[in-house]
Amino acid sequence: VQLQASGGGLVQAGGSLRLSCAMSGLASDYGSVAWFRQAPGKEREGVACIRSRSDGSTYADSVKGRFTISRDNAKNTMYLQMNSLKPEDTAVYYCAGRATRIILSSALDTSSYVYWGQGTLVTVSS
């Protein structure tokens, strides 16, 4: 399984970015995927998760109403649309996956995922 995140960059506060995660080797029928982020000096935290058939998703409170996770199983790609970005959203964003269906209550725990991408840096200037 390989996960490849892309789409990061520098954006002003209030702006938008869309991250992509190309997934290979992860069965789209069952796998659950998620976005995490890690700011300098902080622990990695869950941002959003989406189940295999887009039949369930969850978000961290800090991004609810601003970020939207989606996936296109035909293209084996997951997305994170980030709107109304804030300086505190600055971090390296990682995509993560697992081959089985996830319980949403644990969907934002790093320990719930087996596969990780390499990360893409998002910098939001004030």
Image (spheres, grey):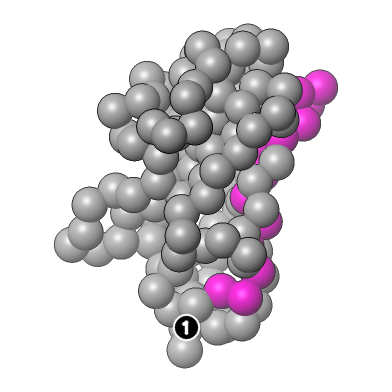
Relative height, residue 121 to residue 109 (above, below): below
Residue 124 image point, x, y percent: 48, 76
Point 56% across, 61% down: residue: 64
Say whether residue 7 is magenta: no
Point 49% across, 32% down: residue: 104
Is residue 94 visible in the rendered image? The answer is no
SS for dot 1: strand
Tag 1: Cα neighbours inside 10 Å, few (<14), some, or many (≥20)? some
Q: Is residue 41 left or right of residue 34?
A: left
Q: Is residue 9 left or right of residue 62?
A: right
Residue 100 image point, x, y percent: 51, 12
Question: What's the magenta region?
Answer: 71-85
Relative height, residue 80 to residue 88 (above, below): above
64, 20: nearer the viewer: 64
Residue type beneath disc 1 = Ser
Q: Residue furthest bottom?
A: 126
Relative height, residue 45 to residue 32 (above, below): below
Q: Which residue is mark 1?
A: 125
Point 32% across, 34% down: residue: 110
Is residue 74 visible in the rendered image? The answer is yes
